[in-house]
Structures are given as C-alpha cells and as structure tokens.
C-alpha cells in the first residue's frame, strides 16, 4: 500500500512538473490574440474573409492607394475654361456643357455649373443625342449630336482621337496642359470632331493629415504608391504634395495588375483597394484586396476584405490594426519563450539538487524544497495566462516603428520581463507556502 501511495505521489509530481515546464503560455494566448484582431476589424466595419487576410495586411510592405477619394477629397471641380488660339471661351464652354450634361460625376456637374454661371448658357436640347460614357480604355466621354462628335478627356487620349480623325493639334495646347498639370490640377481637353477647342481645368485638394500618415507608414517600412488616371505631371505634383513614395499615372487595369506582380516578384506583400469590375483582377492578385461594399459584386468576390463603409482610406487603418495584431503576437510570444526558459532555471535546480548537489549554485532564488517549488510553479502557471489575456485582447500599443526598432522594444520589455517574472513570483509563492507550513 505504501509503495502504491508513493507511486501515485510520484506520478502526481511528474504531471505537475510537466504542466509547469510545458510551453503552455503562448498556446493559451494565440486564440485570444486572433479573436481580438478579428474583433478590431469588425469594430471598423471591415469584414475579413479569413485570419490569413489580416496577417497578410500586417505583413504588407507596399500600399496601392487611389488618388481620388483616398489621398484627395475626390471632388474635383471645374475652375476655368482655357480655349486654344482661334476659339472663344463661349464656344469651348458650350461644347464642354454638351459633353457633360449626361455626366453625373461631381466633375461633370461642376463643368455644367461653371458653363451656365460664367457664360449664361442655356441647357442644350439633347433630343436624339447618343451619349458616350467614360471608360478606362478610352479615358474619354462625350456626346454625338447632329452629326457632331464632342469629346472631353485625358490630353493624350483626345490628341490621339483627334489625330485619327484627321485633325491637327494646336501649338498652344501642350503648354496649357503642362501648366495646369504642374500646378496639381487635372486638364481635360475638349474636341469637336477633328478640332481641339481647349482645356477644362479641374482642381482637387489633398486631405489634411495625409502627409503625416504617409510619413508614419514610411517609418514602418511601408512603401506607398498613388494610383491615378491623371497625366504624369499632375500625378507628380499631387504625389509630392501628399508625400507618397511613388505614383502610377494614366493607370489602366492592366498596368495596375502589372505593378502588383512586379512588387510581388520583388518580395513585397501588396495591399490595395478597389470597387469596380475593372479592379477585380488587381484585387485578386494583391495579397490584401480591400473591396468597397458599394462596389461591384466582382470586386467584392475578388478581394479578401470588404469595407462596409466604402471608405478607401480605411486601408491604412486595416494595415495598422493588422500590424498591432502581429506586434501583439510577437510581444507575447517573446514573453512566453522567455517565461518558459526562466521557469526551467527557477525550479529544476531545486527539484534535482539532492541528486545533483552541484545544481545548488543555479538555485539563485533559494527555493525551499522540491515540493514547494512545484506547487509555486503550478500556481504561477495558473495565474500568468489569465493575467495576460486582457493584454492579448487589448493588444500591445501600436507605434509606427520599423522592424528592428520593434524587435529591440519587444526584447527589452517582454523578453526581459518574461525572464524576471517567473523568478519573482515563484519565489514569492514559495515563501508563502513555506510560511503556511505547506511543504
């Protein structure tokens, strides 16, 4: 009977020792960290299709951001009609008015308002007119009416269209377009068949605080690329004002896709936003595709996240939330590893000092005996995980630092903390048990 009781006691000791020394801390926290990350996404009205999508957002090193609505307010307004030589302002405004009456975009409505207010032009009769909608391929829109083909659009596209129609390009068109573009405006060239009439100047405004946001992203090692349909000069001016690292001007769906693939071949994780059917290939190719809820079904199916608020700027917040999740996981993993290693050095010398007397020198906390050492470690194990769960749910505070700085910070706070905590608390519990005579 005594032998049986001793065997039971030895088994209990071995089980307790295994529980103490097994790396249980991070295993108990990983699920809490993942749930908290998904919850923070939901709080921002972002639906992630998988946990892997959130992790990819945290690893993103290249952000593709649309200029309109993300970097700028997206309310480009017509501010001026600039006719070419031989054309009056009224003629240009009348053609721009006809080409924009069916244009329901803010830019189109602003052109109509400017033409009607500045030149007192009455709304034209569009009976029998054939409307030509804007497309990413032609980068023009307009109307066919009474044998006339009126178009407005990007300078290069209209130049090509006029040339193919047998027309010529006025000498003063290029300086007008360049002057508007260098000032950060968007030039829209207007043509009536093979005749270029002039340029509509659109002006947009960079959102306040974007420069600081991009600086923080740069500090984190994230490269930002502005995607725009504007010409290179306008894109360059807006990019410099906003503080982005690079830009892709006159972007087509094919060029977006090619840019993503180039970045990925260079070893970068790419995140982008989109809402249209023509964005679907790029959203599917990107590591993180944030689709707008107001976008097309194709875009939402291609992306791995959906923003219910349809706010393109949300991509920056998504990356920050995902970074916080990865930083929290890394911090608590560092603490867990250091904590488990420290537990070995805290209780193993006390456990085997009788068998190996030389281990006494490693018993730096001078634990009383093997039994109290094990019980103290069991109590510590039982308390440390619940104590860390609130931190796992709240998340380690996010700071826009690069990887090396985050690693140093984690090592100092959570690595050193993980080493010190077991020695302090196991010794404290050992003293309490000894004082209570439980040894």
Image (tube, rainbow, N blue to C red):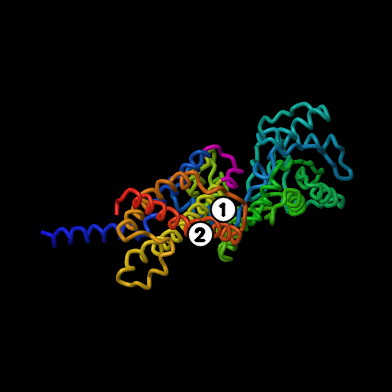
Left/right placement of residue 27 relative to residue 195 reads left
Residue 16: give x, y in percent of width and height: 29, 57
Residue 161 visible in this rendered orientation of the protein: no
Q: Position of residue 114 (x, y in %)?
A: 78, 32
Residue at label 2? 415
Question: On screen, 63 above or below 359?
Answer: above
- In the displayed orientation, state which residue is furthest to the right: 86
The residue closer to the viewer here, 257 or 311, is 311
Q: Is residue 314 at all visible to an observer of this figure? A: yes
Q: Earlier in the sequence, mark 2 or mark 1?
A: 1
| Residue at (58, 60) in percent of width and height | 408
* Left or right: 273, with 96 as reference point: left
CA gap, disc 2 and disc 1: 31 Å
Of residues 185 and 154, the one nearer the viewer is 185
Q: Secondary structure at mark 2?
A: helix
Q: From which residue to which does the magenta span run?
A: 308-317
Q: Which residue appears at 38% of the width and 70% of the height? A: 359
Give the residue at mark 1. 271
Magenta: main secondary structure = loop
In the rendered picture of this protein, how many numbered marks are placed on residues?
A: 2
| Residue 439 in the image, given as x and y percentages of width and height | 29, 54
Which mark, residue 63? none
Nearest to the eye among marks 2 and 1: give it.
Answer: 2
Image quarter where the N terminus lies is bottom left
């Amino acid at each position: 009977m005594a032998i049986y009781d001793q065997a039971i006691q030895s088994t209990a000791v071995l089980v307790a020792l295994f529980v103490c020394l097994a790396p249980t801390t991070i295993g108990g926290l990983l699920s809490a960290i993942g749930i908290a990350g998904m919850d923070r996404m939901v709080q921002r009205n972002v639906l992630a299709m998988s946990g892997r999508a959130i992790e990819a957002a945290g690893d993103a090193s290249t952000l593709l951001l649309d200029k309109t609505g993300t970097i700028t307010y997206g309310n480009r307004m017509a501010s001026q009609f600039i006719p070419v030589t031989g054309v009056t302002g009224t003629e240009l405004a009348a053609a721009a008015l006809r080409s924009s009456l069916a244009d329901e975009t803010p830019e189109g409505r602003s052109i109509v308002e400017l033409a009607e207010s500045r030149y007192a032009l009455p709304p034209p009769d569009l009976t029998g007119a054939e409307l030509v909608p804007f497309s990413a391929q032609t980068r023009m829109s307009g109307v066919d009416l009474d044998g006339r083909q009126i178009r407005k659009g990007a300078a290069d596209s209209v130049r090509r269209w006029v040339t193919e129609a047998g027309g010529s390009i006025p000498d003063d068109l290029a300086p007008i377009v360049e002057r508007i573009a260098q000032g950060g405006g968007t030039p829209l060239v207007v043509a009536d068949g093979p005749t270029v009439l002039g340029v509509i100047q659109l002006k947009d405004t960079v959102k306040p605080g974007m420069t600081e946001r991009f600086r923080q992203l740069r500090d984190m090692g994230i490269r930002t690329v502005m995607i725009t349909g504007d010409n290179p000069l306008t894109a360059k001016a807006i990019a410099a004002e906003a503080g982005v690292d690079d830009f892709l001007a006159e972007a087509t769906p094919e060029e977006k896709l090619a840019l993503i693939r180039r970045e990925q071949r260079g070893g970068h994780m790419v995140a982008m936003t989109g809402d249209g059917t023509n964005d679907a290939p790029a959203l599917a190719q990107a590591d993180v595709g944030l689709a707008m809820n107001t976008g097309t079904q194709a875009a939402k199916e291609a992306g791995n996240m959906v923003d219910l608020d349809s706010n393109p700027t949300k991509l920056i917040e998504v990356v920050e939330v995902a970074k916080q999740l990865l930083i929290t996981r890394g911090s608590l993993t560092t603490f867990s590893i250091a904590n488990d290693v420290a537990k070995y050095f805290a209780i193993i010398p006390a456990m085997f000092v009788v068998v190996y007397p030389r281990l006494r020198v490693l018993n730096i906390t001078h634990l009383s005996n093997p039994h109290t050492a094990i019980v103290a470690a069991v109590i510590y194990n039982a308390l440390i995980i619940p104590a860390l769960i609130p931190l796992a749910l709240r998340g380690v505070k996010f700071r826009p630092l690069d990887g090396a700085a985050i690693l140093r910070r984690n090592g100092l706070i959570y690595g050193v903390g993980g080493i010190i905590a077991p020695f302090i608390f196991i010794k404290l519990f050992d003293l309490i048990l000894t004082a209570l005579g439980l040894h």
